[in-house]
Image (cartoon, rainbow, N blue to C red):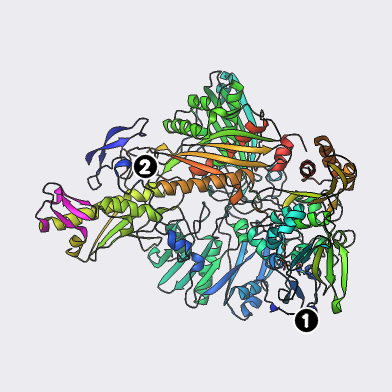
Amino acid sequence: MKKFTWVQPDNIDEAQRQINAVTATIATGKTIQGAAVIKAGGVDLLDLMKENIIAPAKIVSINALPGLGKIGFDEKSGLRIGALVKLSDLEENAEIKKHYAALHESVSHAATPQIRNMATLGGNLAQRPRCWYFRSEDHKCLKKGGTKCFAQEGQNQIHGIFNTEICPCVHSSSVSTALVAFGAQVEITGAKGKLRNVPLAEFFVSPQVDVTRENILERGEIITALTVPAPPKGQKSWYIKQAAKESYDWALADAAVVAQMSGDTIKDVKIVLGAAAPTPYRATAAEQLLRGQKVSEKLAVQVGTAAVEGATPLAHNAYKVPMFKAIVKECVLNLV
Amino acid sequence: MRKEKFPIGIPGVNLREIEREVPVTEPPAWPINDKLKHVGKSVKRTDAILKVTGKAKYTADINLPGMLQGRMLRSPHPSAKILSIDTSAAEAFPGVKAVYVLRSNMSGAEPKGGEDNGYPEIKYAGQAIAGVAAKDGQTAEEALKLIKVEYQTMPFVVDMDEAREPGAPLVFEQQVEQEETGGGGGGAKGLEQQGNVRGPSTKSFFGGPRGDVEQGMAEADVIVEGIFRTQVQTHSALETHGIVADWKPDMLTVYASTQSTKGVRSEMASIFDLPESKVRVICEYMGGGFGAKYGAGNFGVTAVNLSKISGQPVKLMLDRKAEHLAVGNRPNSWQELKIGAKKDGTLTAIKQESYGTAGIGLGAGVGRVAQAVYECPNFLTEQYDVFTNAGPGAAFRAPGNPQGAFALEQLIDELAEKLGTDALELRDKIDNSVVRKEERRLAAKAINWSRRKKPGSDTGVIKRGIGVAQSTWPRLIDIDSTAEVRMYRDGTVEIRSGVMDIGTGTRTILSQIVAEELGLEPEQISVKIGDTLFPNGPASGGSKVSGSITPAARNAAYKAKQEILKQAAPKMEEKAADLELKDGMIVSKTSGKTMSFKDALKQMRTSQIMTSASREDDYGGFMVGTFISHGDLGSVQMAEVSVNTETGFVKVEKIVAAHSCGRPLNPMQIQSQVNGGVIQGISYALYEDRVMDKNTGHMLNANLDQYKIAFSMEIPDIEVINIEEYTARSSTDAFGIAEPANIATAAAVANAIYNAIGVRLYELPMTPDKVLKALNLV
Ligand SMILES: Cc1cc2nc3c(=O)[nH]c(=O)nc-3n(C[C@H](O)[C@H](O)[C@H](O)COP(=O)(O)OP(=O)(O)OC[C@H]3O[C@@H](n4cnc5c(N)ncnc54)[C@H](O)[C@@H]3O)c2cc1C
C-alpha cells in the first residue's frame, strides 16, 4: 500500500473542500493531483488500496460528520437511515425487523459480524464490484479504463446473467437488493449543501451508461441518508441470499420480494434480484404474474420461472438460473 | 537384548500379549493406557495460555535490533525470459539497504541443460525474481516497483487438459530428471517425458503392480468404472511462509515458520556453503503447515542474501497472494478407475490411470489408497505428471490420497449397490483390516447407519443422505529423531529436541511422556523444542512426529532415571535396581524407603544430568526399510449431508471419524487433530478451488475471499472415535494422526450426497453448480 495522508473534518463543507475524487475515477488510472477520496468504514476502500487498484494520496474520513449516524422511523414518513449507520445497527433495529423484514434479512446475511460492525450503509451502496478481474492488478479491464472485459471469455461463474454484453460483473451490495424492492431513495448532498433525492434504482449506473462506475456520485458528493417509504398496510416482505457458504460469502444469487397484501391476495409487489446483473435487477414479468393473485405453490414456481425470463447466462454461470428460480419461489411462499 | 511382554491388539477386540526383544538400554513395556497416569490422558496443551494471550512468539513476531523488512518481486507473466534486470533505482531509493536478484528458481522441477543467462526462467505468474530489504515494508514495496525487468513473454498453458494436448506450449523444453517433490507419487526419477506429460509412475513404496489386471477383469462378474476429477487446493495455513534471517560472520541464525528445522539448516548450509554447525534454525511456535513448509524456499534464500548484503537482520513474510501462488498446493487430478469383482464381492482387479498437475512441480499422483486398502490380487496404476505454467505443488496432508480416495471409495459404493449389498457389508468382506472393521462398527453405531435410506428416496426439496469412506496411511518413522533429557540440581527437568510443534501438540505429549517415565507431573517438565541447537528431531510431515520422537523421549528419560537412581541408591542404602520413581518420590520396591525426587537431584554429583536417545529400529524390525512400521493408520469416516435439490446447496450435518494412531497419547489433542482434518476435508469436498484464467495465465482468487474455505458455519457436528491399538513396536507404541484425518472426508461426503439425491458427483469441489448439473437442472 502506498503512503497517504489522513484528514477527518467535522463538518460537511470542510469535507467537501478536501475531497477531490471518487474512487471509480482513480481506479481507471486517471491521474488526479493529490487524489482525496471519501472513507467511511474503510472496508472496501482499504481492500482496493491493498489490492493496488487505487492509491489515493489522501483519505478523507467522514466519520466525524455530525448527524449521519442515526436511524429514524415513523409510521407515517417511514424510515430514514443516516449514511454512517453501521450494518450492525440496522441488523439490531427492532423497527426494521418488524416493518421491513426483507431488509433485516439482507443486512443480517451480509458479510460477517465483524465487518458489519465497521461497514456503513453509505459505503455499502458505493462499494465496488467483486469481479476477480476488476480486483486483480494483473488485469486492466474495462472498469479500470482498459480495453477488454476478461470475464466474457474467462472465468465468469460469479458474474451476472442479465445485461452481460459489456461488463457482466454484478453489484456486490446485497443490501441494495432489499432496499430497491422497498423503493428506497438516496439523499445526496452536493456542494454548498445542495440536496438531491434519487430513487436507489436510479442511483446505480449500468455499463451502457458508464462502465467505469456503478453509481451516479459525482466528485465531492456525499451520500447523507437513505429513506424508505412508510410501510403500506399489509406490507409483507422476504429476502433470501444463496451463497456457496453460509458463514459470510458473497451472494451467488439473492432475491427480495416486497408485497402489499390484502388478506391472501397480492395487490402490488416488487421483486428484485441481486448478483444477477450489473445493477439490482427488477423482475417485472414475475411481478406481473403475482399482482392480484393469491399465493400458491404452483404460482410461486411460475413466478420463479418468470423471474429469470430473458436471462443470458455466460459459459460458467448457467446454474444461477435454477438457483434464482428456487429462491424467488421460496421468497414468494414466505409471504403467506 | 532383553525379552519383554507387551500388550498387542485392540482392547475389547483382540487384546493379548506378545513377547519381543528390546535393547537393554530401553525401558520396560508400558501397559495399556488404562494403567498409566499421564499418557493416554487429555492433558491440557502446555502452551495454550501462551498462545491465546499472544505471548507465544511466532516468526512474524520476532523483532531483532536493526531488523529490516524484506519484500519480494514476483513475475506478472506466466511464461517469460528475463532479458535484463536493472536494480539501480531501487538500490538508490532512500531507506533501501539491500537488493538481491535470484539466480534461479528454487522450487519446482529443474530441467537439465538449457541456456542460462543468469536470471531465473519465468514459468508461472507469481514466480519469485528478486527481493528488497528496507527500513520498513512500505519503502521496500515502493522500491520493488523501481526494479526494471525486461521480459520476453512466451506462450504458456495453465489448464491441465490443454497442456496434455500435442502442440501445447512446452513448460519445460528439456527433460526433467528429478524425483517428485509433492509426495503424491507419480514422479520417479528418470521417467519418460512427452510434451508436458511425464510418466507413467507405477510403483510406490508398497511395491509395484501385482498380478494381471486384464485377467482379473476377465474373471470379474461385475465391473464398475468412472472418471473422477479433483481440483487444486492451496495450503492456506493461518501463518504464511516467512523467515527472519540474521547473517553474522560466525553464525547464520534463521527464524522460520517451518516443518523441519533440520531441513532448513542443511539446505541453508549447502546453499551458502557454510558448515551446518554455523547455521542455527529456530521455530519455537508455528502457525500451521500442511506439507508446504520445508526447505529454504526462494523467499528464505532471498532473505538470507539480503541480510548478508546489508549486514542487518531481515524479516520476510509472504503475503496471502504469494502464499496461494508460489509456495505449494495439492495438485489436481483426472483419474480413470476400474474395479472388477465377483458376485460375492471379492475383488478381482483394480486398474487406475491418473493425470495431475503440480504446475512446474512434480508428484501429482493419486496416492496409494487404491493399492492398499482392499484385498485384490491384480492391481495396476499408471500415474502421470502434467506440467503447467502454475506454482509448484507440494506435499499436502496425505499427498495424493484424498484424490485417490474420492475415486476409490465412490466406486466401492457403486459396486456395493450393483451387488445389492450394503456398503459396510461389502467392506467387511473385502477389507481385512481388523482396525477398520472395529471402526466401521463404532462409526455405524454413532451415525445410526441402519436408518440409511435408498439413494434419492428422501422426499421434499431438501434430501438427506449418509455415506462412508475409508483410508489407509503408512506408519512413517524418522529414525533421525533424538531427544535429550536434563535434570538440574534445582529439581527441574527439561527435554530438548529440534522437533517443532506445528500446532499438533508435540510440546504437550513430550511433557506427558517424560512425566510418566519419571513419576512427575507434566507441568514439571520444561519442553524446549524447535531449535537446531538441540538434537535433531523429526520433520513434521508424514504424520511421523509422535511415532518418531516419543520413543526417543521416553528412552532418554529412562536413561536419566537410571542415572539418578544409581546416584540416589547409596544414599538411601538401597540397590538401584530396587528403586522406582513415583509421584515425585524415589521409592524402594523392597523396603518401602523413600526419598523425594527433588532431594535426590539436590545431591547430584554434577549440577546436571544429561542423557539422550535416538529413535531405534522398531522392535521386531520395520516393515519397509528403516522408515515404515508394520500395520497402517486405518480410518473410517461417515458423513451425513443435506442437499437442497433446487439450489444445489450441500450442507454437511455430521461427520463421524473413527481413527487409529497406535497408542493414543492425548485423546483431546487427537480429537483436535481429527477435527482439523475433517474440516479441511469438508473444505476440499465443497469449497476450495484454485481458479486459473486460461487466457491470461493468472490465478483469479489468490486471497481468502474468493478462495473459499470452510468457516464456522460450515463445520458440522464432528464426532471423533479413537481406537486404542497396540502393536508393541517401540517404547511408546504411538503413531501420528494428522494426515489420516483428512483422507476419507471428501469421499464420505460424496457418497452421502449420492445417497441423498441418487446421482453421483464425479468432480470436486461439489459446489451448487455441479449438483444442479448432476440433477439436470442446468
Ligand atoms: C469479506 C466481505 C464480505 C462482504 N459481504 C457483503 C455482502 O454479503 N453483502 C453486502 O452488501 N456487502 C458485503 N460486503 C461489503 C461491505 O458491506 C462494504 O464493503 C461496506 O459496507 C463498505 O462500507 P464502508 O463504510 O466500509 O465503506 P468504505 O470502504 O469507507 O467506502 C466504500 C466506498 O464508498 C465511498 N463512500 C463511503 N461512504 C460514502 C458516502 N457517505 N458518500 C459517498 N461515498 C461514500 C468511498 O469513497 C469508497 O469508494 C462485504 C465486504 C467484505 C470485506
In magenta stretch: residue B576: yes
Q: In which quarter of the image is the N terminus of chain A?
A: bottom right
Q: Which of B3 and B586 is in front in this view?
A: B586
Helix, strand or loop for disc 1: helix
Q: Dot 1 corresponds to which residue?
A: A14
Which amino acid type is marked by label 1?
A: Glu
- State the residue at coordinates (33%, 55%): B522
Is residue A190 left or right of B103 when viewed as pictured?
A: right
- State the residue at coordinates (75%, 64%): A121
Q: Which of A205 and B476 is in front in this view?
A: A205
Residue A47 visible in image: yes
- State the residue at coordinates (33%, 47%): B39
Q: In which quarter of the image is the C terminus of chain A?
A: top right
Mark 1, other Cα within 10 Å: few <14 / some 14–19 / many ≥20: few
Q: Dot 2 corresponds to which residue?
A: B663
Q: Is residue A154 above or below residue B437?
A: below
Q: Is residue B747 above or below residue B67?
A: above
